[in-house]
Image (tube, helix red, strand yellow):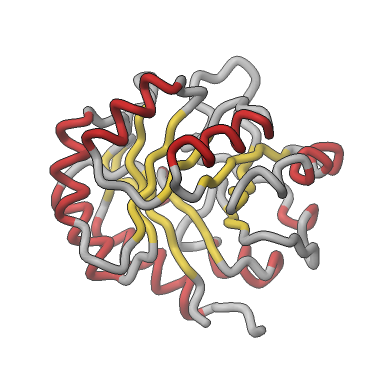
Amino acid sequence: MSTRVKICGLGRSSDVAACAAAGASYVGFVFFEKSPRNVSLDVAQALALEVPLGIAKVALTVNADDAALDALMDRVPLDMLQLHGSESPERVAEVRDRFGLPVMKAVGIADEGDLAGLNEYFRAADQILIDAKPPKGGDLPGGNGLSFDWRLIAERRWGIPWMLAGGLTPSNVAEAIHLTKAKQVDVSSGVEGERGVKDAKLIEQFITAAQDNTPKL
């Protein structure tokens, strides 16, 4: 099975077209005002309607309350919610039950001590996104272009689907997949020509590199 790729932080029609042409499995829209990739509900709605069938549309939110999620769900056709803040396992389960969509919970990793935190979310989330911890004092919980030591999760297996993120680029994603055996990968800043702006060629290169080095089952 080919490695599934998520391109996060889309903001233009050309981004959607590039992801579709290159073979992305997921596209992500960011709803976090501090992010350079933040989009309005109007923009996200228009872009989501352009996404071809078969590509999952994911909304990245950060500690969003029910009112914000209600507004989002009312306007934007989505397939999955990605919770990228400090949401507790209880909050993750609550969101999944209330909104009826699969939920992916992002968990930041910096050292081996952080791995225990993953276990807390296995019953609450449908998928786990294993990301690099943001720098201390940073405004963004993800999309910082930082990676973690992939050896920390090499050969580990979990009971629900998971996705590798954090500092991935067209030049290192093959190594990351080889080391971690990840079947899904996520990228944002690693396919940008400038901060917050996706580059179609880099998207193509990233997906090609990921799928050409798919781990054997």
User: Which of 61/167 is in front?
Assistant: 61
Residue in view at x 30 percent, y 39 percent:
194
In the image, is 165 to the left or to the right of 192? right
How many numbered marks does the figure carry?
0
User: Which of 94/217 is in front?
Assistant: 94
Depicted 57 relative to depicted 75: above or below: below
Name the residue at the top extreme.
137
Residue in view at x 28 percent, y 44 percent:
10
Q: Position of residue 175 (x, y in %)?
A: 62, 67
Residue in view at x 48 percent, y 27 percent:
62
User: Which of 182/137 is in front?
Assistant: 182
Instruction: State which quadrant residue 106 falls in.
Output: top right
Q: Position of residue 195 (x, y in %)?
A: 33, 35
Q: Position of residue 191 (x, y in %)?
A: 37, 52
**Quadrant location, the C terminus:** bottom right
Residue in view at x 73 percent, y 49 percent:
149
Q: Position of residue 111 (x, y in %)?
A: 80, 40
In the image, is 148 to the left or to the right of 104? right
User: Which of 178/39 is in front?
Assistant: 39
In the image, is 151 to the left or to the right of 204? right
Depicted 126 relative to depicted 67: above or below: below
Instruction: State which quadrant residue 172 falls in.
Output: bottom right
In the image, is 164 to the left or to the right of 120? left
